[in-house]
Amino acid sequence: MLGIVPIVTTLAVFKYVGLISDWGIANRRQRHLFGAIAIAWGGITTWVLFQLQFSELGLFLLWLVGGNIIFSAITLFWKISAHTAAVTLFSLFTIYVYGALWLSLLLIIFTVAWARMLLKKHTPAQVLAGIALGISLFWIGREVGWI
């Protein structure tokens, strides 16, 4: 709750005062300030977790904050699908932790990618880049030993 409440509150305030035009922040230029605030809140939450001696959870969150930094850096120049990145990372993480029984989660990746394109929120290249980012973040987390 420590990490999600400030993010959702920030999103609601941004929508209310007109800093974003829609809840999905479809306009890439409107994502920068929100992304910076999300990274800051993630950093604060990570720091709190380390202070409370939840170092494993803190490392996991630090991994996610790092992914958010990479995503935000890409968004400065190009629109990438955060939805496909997140669902790819979640699916791979779940399969890695809980086993092959969860392989059906891979279908969700393609469902989300298809939906983002059907809704005309992203191009095929943007959803494929999101999938690649999710795979990369998973690989980094596994190689570093954070999962």
Image (cartoon, grey):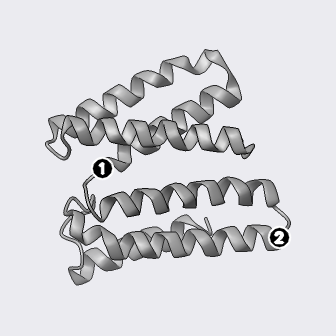
Q: Nearer the viewer, mark 2 or mark 1?
A: 1
Marks 2,1: beta carbons within 8 A: no
**131 relative to 147 in the view: left or right:** left
Image quadrant containing the C terminus: top right
Q: Is residue 82 above or below residue 66?
A: above
Q: Nearer the viewer, residue 122 or 1?
A: 122
Name the amino acid, label 1. Ile
**Which residue does the image show at 46% across and 35% down from the upper left?**
88
Residue 2: image quadrant is bottom right
The secondary element bearing badge 2 is classed as: loop
Direction from residue 107 to residue 65 in the image, left or right: right
Identify the residue at the far top of this view.
Answer: 101
Q: Which residue is mark 2?
A: 52
Q: In which image quadrant can residue 144 be found?
A: top right
| Residue in view at x 44 percent, y 43 percent | 133
Residue 80 percent location from the top left of the image: 30, 50
Residue 69, position as x, y percentages in the image:
48, 63
Instruction: Say which amino acid is labelled 2.
Output: Leu
- Whole-number angstrom distance, CA of label 2 to CA of label 1: 34 Å
Horizontal side, residue 17 vs residue 138: left or right: left
Residue 49, image x, y percentages: 75, 67
What residue is pinned by disc 1? 80
